[in-house]
Image (tube, rainbow, N blue to C red):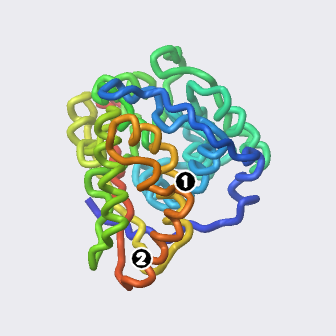
């Protein structure tokens, strides 16, 4: 698998359609996953602060996701299904590749995130993108799609292989499935060592594991697609390289910690007073500045394959 070096995605809020969904942040988070339960009930909730975090985080993930979609062969005129589309970022990347002669359908269970996605599509001027409230299980198998895509979807599924099989049911024979997941178990690579960053990752990883998130999903993508009956074609690996104190990186990390903090406390992983969430970003930035090292906040893996059968 080739390696893609991730550069900061950047981009103005207006270009990304961020502002239509960014209202006043709320202090509470509706995290519905219980310890050792299936993480299909998305652990990070859908509060305004969380929607904002997801959109900013998507700017970091965009270069690798676009590389996955291009590698998978998305091109003008194709019909694409985006499973677990959230606020629409992957749908918009796909829409750029398939153009106005193509079609992108984004599906998600949450009406609130879909309303946000629809407003963003209107701001971005993408009439060939539409969104539908549905779980994958209840989505009717209608006219098959040329491609089915998803980002950070399988890590929350109790049975990723079965979920991929259901995704493939919506593909035409020869159609492509393209997925982008995190390898959470590899998060936090740094040199020299960064004690506070390591401590934060030491809080996050066991919390994710205990609420049922698949922390090895990135590196399990290939075997998952094969077990689901697809032919794996290729894949990429990438990560954001933090070489200077970076507000975007620390902000995304701190907001993830914020949404996980109630679980950390409930599970006895960390106490709110030791996390000190309101000063965490400043402390992380100061550590990176004084250390002078580099870090890879997350390792991202993208894999694509196709449904067997005559094209």
Query: Residue at left 65%, top 31%?
Result: 131
State which quarter of the image contains the N terminus. Answer: bottom left
Viewer-closest of 282 and 224: 282
Image quadrant where residue 242 sits: bottom left
Question: Along the horizontal axis of the image, is 16 left or right of 42?
Answer: right
Residue 95 on image: x %, y % = 62, 46
Residue 49 on image: x %, y % = 64, 46
Q: CA distance from mark 2 to mark 1?
A: 25 Å
Image quadrant where residue 108 sits: top right
Question: Along the horizontal axis of the image, is 14 left or right of 158?
Answer: right
Helix, strand or loop at label 2? It is helix
State which quarter of the image contains the C terminus. Answer: top left
Q: Residue 58 got which mark?
A: 1
The answer to whether any part of residue 86 appears in the image is yes
Q: Residue 287 got which mark?
A: 2
Residue 276 on image: x %, y % = 49, 57
As displayed, is residue 53 above or below residue 229? below
């Amino acid at each position: 698998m080739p390696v893609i070096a991730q550069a900061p995605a950047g981009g103005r809020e207006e270009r990304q359609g961020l502002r239509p969904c960014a209202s006043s942040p709320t202090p509470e988070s509706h995290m519905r996953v219980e310890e050792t339960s299936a993480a299909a009930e998305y652990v990070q909730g859908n509060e305004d602060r969380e929607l904002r975090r997801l959109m900013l985080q998507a700017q970091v993930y965009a270069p690798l996701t676009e590389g996955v979609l291009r590698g998978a062969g998305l091109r003008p005129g194709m019909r694409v299904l985006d499973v677990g589309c959230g606020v629409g970022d992957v749908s918009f990347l796909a829409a750029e590749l398939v153009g106005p002669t193509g079609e992108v359908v984004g599906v998600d269970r949450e009406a609130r995130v879909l309303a946000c996605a629809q407003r963003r599509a209107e701001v971005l001027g993408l009439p060939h993108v539409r969104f539908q409230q549905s779980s994958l299980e209840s989505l009717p198998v209608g006219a098959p799609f040329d491609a089915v895509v998803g980002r950070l979807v399988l890590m929350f599924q109790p049975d990723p292989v079965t979920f991929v099989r259901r995704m493939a049911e919506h593909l035409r024979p020869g159609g492509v499935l393209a997925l982008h997941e995190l390898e959470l178990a590899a998060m936090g690579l740094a040199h020299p060592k960064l004690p506070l960053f390591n401590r934060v990752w030491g809080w996050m990883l066991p919390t994710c594991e205990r609420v049922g998130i698949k922390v090895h999903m990135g590196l399990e993508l290939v075997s998952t697609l094969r077990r689901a009956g697809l032919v794996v074609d290729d894949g990429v690996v990438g990560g954001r390289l933090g070489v200077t104190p970076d507000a975007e990186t620390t902000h995304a990390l701190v907001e993830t910690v914020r949404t996980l903090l109630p679980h950390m406390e409930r599970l006895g992983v960390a106490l709110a007073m030791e996390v000190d969430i309101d000063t965490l970003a400043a402390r992380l930035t100061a550590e990176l500045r004084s250390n002078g090292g580099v870090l890879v906040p997350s390792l991202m893996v993208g894999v694509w394959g196709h449904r067997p059968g005559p094209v």
